[in-house]
Image (tube, coloured by chain):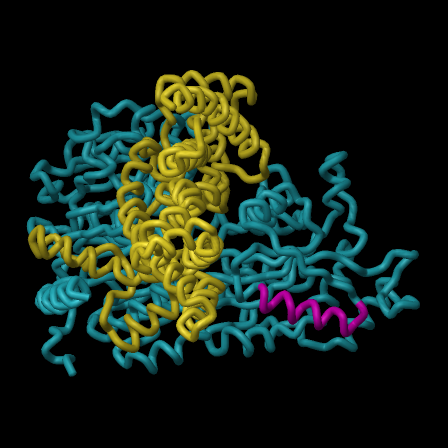
Chain colours: A cyan, B yellow
């Protein structure tokens, strides 16, 4: 007992101490630790977010919420005029300006001459060339190596770095492509983050991932790594010498690893943590009731759930490599009937509330420049669904289950374990389908196993989700070449999709491709290769003491270096 | 006895080794891919292949096994796939102190409270006190740990903010000085250790009560009482020592727990201990880390059993090794 009271005394003392430190420290609760704080090999979202604060960028990216277009900014030049509330100042960019050659086969950057790494050495064009070689090295296996896909030599399998990237002097950087490239793509693919050459040059490629330098990154951004206790916490401190654009406003940012969701939420309530990402809609009311300083913020629509139907006979394809329609879902009338039989709105109302939006295709409503508002979603209409199924030859059998040529309409719907939202949706879907005479069994698999089965196209029907990129590129998911399109799990084949996507890529201005994407959406809507369920607003819990935050579809920490903290004196009870 | 221990240890070597070999093959034959994380839209299809190449997963299974064997015999368990290529030995050495702190505190509390409650229940058999303790112990014993932990958090961290919700230390605890830091750590350990030891002590109390009741009815206890010894001496000196024999088995089997960690508690209280290392390694198909964890727990189970047997011989002169 004596020990206990001694502890709690020290507890209150430490609480008082931390109140003083609190005004200069922001705490973010996160599920798992960062992997590499190294832009070449960092793979998790957390790592990219944190690296983004430590390392400088050639250009600054900006997501325009008004049009849904990505914009690129150099100090003295922008790809397109900025509009909307999330416009950024370009002061963090390393490039002063750029110019595309008339044949669009090269881009030349002029860099600023006052940029320095955190150790005081200047940032030069050579750092970029050095780092691009690392990105392209197969021994390093960078997850960003496809950014080099247009550089000279890439068409022959091996980028010829001496010709592809030239550095005539410290502030001039030239990238050469083997084919004409639209300006926005050139900017996107040449703006990978550099590493300081003088620090990394002696690290052998095969030891790159093991190098201890990964634990003490030297960057040039508004923050630097102060402390990293693996699996516990990661602390960044504002970098006083930073001029890209300036030292971060908040002195210390702490990422605390709290694996359990309930506990992260509890810490948001107690104020131990200021930001928790992905708060579930069902918890909003309780959290805000317990702590009025917590507010829920949302970002654009980037994530959707869907029910996948195998369009082709997966088993037959795996055995023979030939495509033939799936016995149950091969007919587009059947797929459309399934979509119309599922009460998607009631899943949204029951689980997501105002944070869910009915999905029509995989072009997000947030990408306004491409999104086709004129498509009417298939209504929830079970009578119509039954009619469509009858047209396709499915009629009720003796046991009430639909039948065709002696085959019962019965299947297993697979999903991954541990996702309450998907479980909820699955149960409603099962009930809806039962109402029109379709038997659906729900099977839950461990995530890793589930994903492997999907890749091997072993599942007939499943529920999963995608997070979309901010550039539209559907070939990975809908391309007709099933060997190349690894994520075309349903085996949906429509050559027009490949054509449209090729045509869109040839357009030199992103927004000029709109007609192609409108046609693309019509095709997906008509064919219903999968049943698109709903888009979800990602919802983040924020403490109100944070000011100046702008959340954006490209990340919750879009402008974290501009955030400030309200002093606790003004909010103390 | 020395010979006996040596013999057992020698038998343990092929045993642990067999376990590792089995684990090696089972995890590689099980579905799932360590490079699965790199298979997603927007990442070049080459990456997963290059990563597998780096991890040496493209070799035929027997070749992988021989290479692995050669490394392990030199004491090299390799580098973790999922934890940024950190050597697995380092990963485990970082996690062990956390796990051991919790486990040792918990075990001490477990046995002290368990034995005290068990003895009281047995001596006052069928009294109100005994019933009360028995019911309470069963009540806590049947409560799922993770739920109990969450309830404790709600009660003592949210409703009555006496203790921190989670973590090993306050943010910025380094600035409190050595004493402050340790106090802060202890303050953070109160809830998790309480949860674990209430649960464990309840179980041990049931064992102690049972074996104590048996011993109390023995003839030699009656003899001791007949000699005119005080009840205190009879219970604590003559009965308790004999009643504790089965509890010693429990001690031996608790050894693996010290090293393997308490998963739920680690997840809920955000402690980076062995339980989390093991489970996260399994989910990520981090083969080297899974093997190393199997090695640690395998060795501990073998040693724990050996320790229990040796302790038996030490406390019970009837047993000869």
**Is A204 placed left or right of A450 in the picture?**
left
Q: Position of residue A437 (x, y in %)?
A: 81, 69
From this viewpoint, is residue A469 visible? no
Q: In this picture, is A118 found above or below A279?
A: above
Name the one closer to the observer, B260 or A440: B260
**Is B314 placed left or right of A543 in the picture?**
right
Quadrant, the C terminus of chain B: top left
Q: Give the total number of marks visible in the rendering.
A: 0
Q: Position of residue B90 (x, y in %)?
A: 29, 34
From this viewpoint, is residue B216 visible? yes
Name the one closer to the observer, A313 or A460: A460
Q: Residue, x 12% and y 80% (percent of image)? A: A570
Q: Which residues are magenta?
A: A423-437
Does A475 lie within the magenta span?
A: no
Quadrant, the N terminus of chain B: top left
Q: Residue, x 43% and y 65% (percent of image)? A: B137
Q: Residue furthest front?
A: B227
Q: In this picture, is B111 found above or below A526?
A: above
Q: Residue, x 34% and y 59% (percent of image)? A: B116
Residue A323 occupies quadrant: top right
Q: Main secondary structure of the magenta part?
A: helix
Q: Position of residue A487 (x, y in %)?
A: 58, 46
Residue B259 occupies quadrant: top left
Name the one closer to the observer, B3 or B241: B241
Residue A17 occupies quadrant: bottom left
Q: Residue, x 49% and y 45% (percent of image)? A: B40
**Is B211 placed left or right of A44 in the picture?**
right
């Amino acid at each position: 007992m004596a020990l206990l009271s001694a502890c709690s005394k020290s507890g209150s003392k430490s609480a008082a101490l931390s109140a003083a430190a609190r005004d200069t420290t922001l705490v973010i609760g996160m599920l798992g630790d960062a992997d590499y704080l190294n832009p070449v090999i960092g793979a998790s979202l957390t790592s990219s977010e944190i690296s983004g604060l430590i390392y400088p960028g050639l250009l600054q990216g900006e997501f325009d919420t008004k049009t849904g277009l990505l914009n690129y900014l150099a100090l003295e030049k922008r790809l397109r005029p900025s509009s909307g509330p999330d416009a950024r100042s370009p002061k963090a960019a390393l490039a002063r300006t750029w110019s595309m050659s008339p044949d669009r086969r090269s881009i030349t950057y002029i860099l600023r001459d006052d940029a320095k790494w955190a150790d005081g050495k200047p940032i030069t064009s050579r750092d970029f060339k050095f780092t691009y070689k690392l990105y392209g090295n197969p021994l390093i296996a960078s997850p960003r190596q496809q950014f080099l896909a247009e550089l000279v030599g890439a068409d022959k399998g091996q980028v010829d770095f001496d010709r592809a990237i030239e550095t005539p002097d410290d502030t001039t950087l030239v990238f050469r492509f083997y084919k004409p490239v639209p300006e926005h793509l050139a900017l996107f693919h040449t703006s990978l983050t550099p590493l300081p050459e003088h620090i990394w040059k002696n690290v052998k490629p095969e030891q790159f991932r093991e190098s201890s330098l990964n634990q003490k990154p030297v960057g040039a951004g508004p923050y630097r790594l102060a402390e990293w206790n693996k699996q516990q916490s990661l602390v960044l401190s504002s970098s006083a010498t930073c001029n890209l654009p300036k030292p971060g406003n908040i002195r210390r940012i702490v990422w605390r690893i709290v694996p359990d969701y309930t506990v992260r939420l509890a810490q948001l309530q107690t104020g131990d943590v200021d930001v928790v990402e992905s708060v579930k809609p069902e918890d909003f009311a309780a959290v805000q009731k317990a702590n009025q300083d917590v507010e829920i913020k949302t970002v654009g629509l980037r994530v959707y759930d869907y029910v996948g139907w195998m369009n082709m006979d997966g088993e037959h394809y795996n055995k023979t490599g030939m495509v033939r329609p799936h016995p149950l879902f091969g007919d587009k009338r059947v797929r459309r009937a399934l979509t119309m039989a599922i009460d998607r709105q009631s899943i949204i109302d029951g689980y997501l509330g105002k944070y869910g939006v009915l999905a029509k295709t995989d072009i997000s409503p947030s990408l306004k420049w491409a999104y086709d508002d004129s498509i009417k979603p298939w209504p929830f209409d079970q009578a119509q669904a039954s009619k469509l199924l009858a047209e396709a030859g499915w009629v009720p059998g003796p046991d009430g289950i639909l039948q065709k040529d002696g085959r019962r309409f019965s299947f297993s719907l697979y999903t991954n374990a541990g996702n309450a939202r998907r479980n909820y949706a699955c149960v409603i879907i099962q009930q809806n389908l039962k109402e029109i005479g379709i038997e659906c069994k729900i099977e839950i698999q461990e995530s890793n196993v589930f994903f492997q089965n999907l890749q091997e196209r072993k599942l007939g029907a499943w529920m999963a989700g995608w997070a979309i990129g901010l550039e539209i590129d559907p070939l990975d998911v809908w391309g007709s070449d099933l060997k190349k399109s690894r994520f075309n799990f349903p085996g949906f084949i429509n050559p027009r999709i490949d054509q449209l996507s090729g045509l869109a890529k040839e357009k030199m201005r992103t927004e000029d491709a709109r007609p192609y994407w409108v046609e693309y959406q019509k095709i997906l809507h008509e064919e219903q290769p999968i049943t698109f369920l709903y888009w979800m607003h990602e919802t983040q819990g924020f403490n109100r003491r944070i000011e100046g935050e702008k959340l954006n579809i490209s990340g919750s920490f879009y402008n974290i270096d501009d955030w400030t903290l309200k002093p606790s004196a003004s909010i103390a009870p | 006895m020395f010979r006996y221990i040596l013999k057992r240890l020698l038998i343990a070597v092929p045993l642990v080794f067999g376990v590792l070999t089995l684990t090696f093959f089972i995890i590689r034959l099980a579905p799932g891919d360590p490079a699965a994380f790199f298979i997603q839209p927007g990442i070049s299809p080459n990456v997963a292949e290059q990563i597998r190449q780096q991890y040496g997963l493209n070799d035929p299974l027997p070749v992988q096994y021989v290479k692995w064997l050669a490394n392990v015999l030199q004491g090299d368990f390799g580098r973790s796939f999922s934890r940024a290529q950190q050597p697995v030995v380092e990963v485990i050495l970082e996690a062990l102190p956390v796990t051991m702190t919790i486990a040792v505190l918990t075990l001490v509390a477990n046995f002290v409270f368990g034995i005290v409650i068990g003895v009281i229940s047995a001596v006052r058999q069928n009294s109100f006190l005994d019933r009360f303790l028995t019911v309470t112990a069963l009540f806590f014993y049947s409560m799922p740990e993770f739920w109990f932990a969450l309830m404790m958090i709600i009660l003592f961290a949210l409703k009555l903010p006496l203790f921190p919700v989670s973590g090993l230390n306050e943010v910025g605890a380094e600035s409190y000085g050595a004493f402050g830091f340790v106090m802060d750590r202890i303050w953070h350990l109160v809830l998790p250790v309480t949860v674990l030891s209430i649960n464990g002590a309840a179980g041990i109390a049931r064992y102690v009560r049972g074996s104590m009741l048996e011993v109390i009815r023995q003839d030699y206890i009656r003899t001791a009482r007949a000699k005119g010894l005080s009840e205190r001496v009879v219970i604590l000196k003559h009965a308790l020592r004999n009643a504790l024999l089965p509890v010693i088995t429990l001690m031996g089997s608790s050894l693996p727990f010290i090293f393997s960690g308490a998963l739920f508690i680690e997840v809920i209280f955000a402690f980076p201990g062995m339980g989390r290392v093991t489970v996260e390694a399994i989910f990520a198909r981090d083969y080297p880390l899974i093997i190393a964890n199997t090695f640690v727990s395998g060795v501990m189970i073998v040693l724990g059993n050996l320790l229990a047997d040796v302790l038996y011989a030490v406390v019970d002169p009837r047993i000869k090794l």
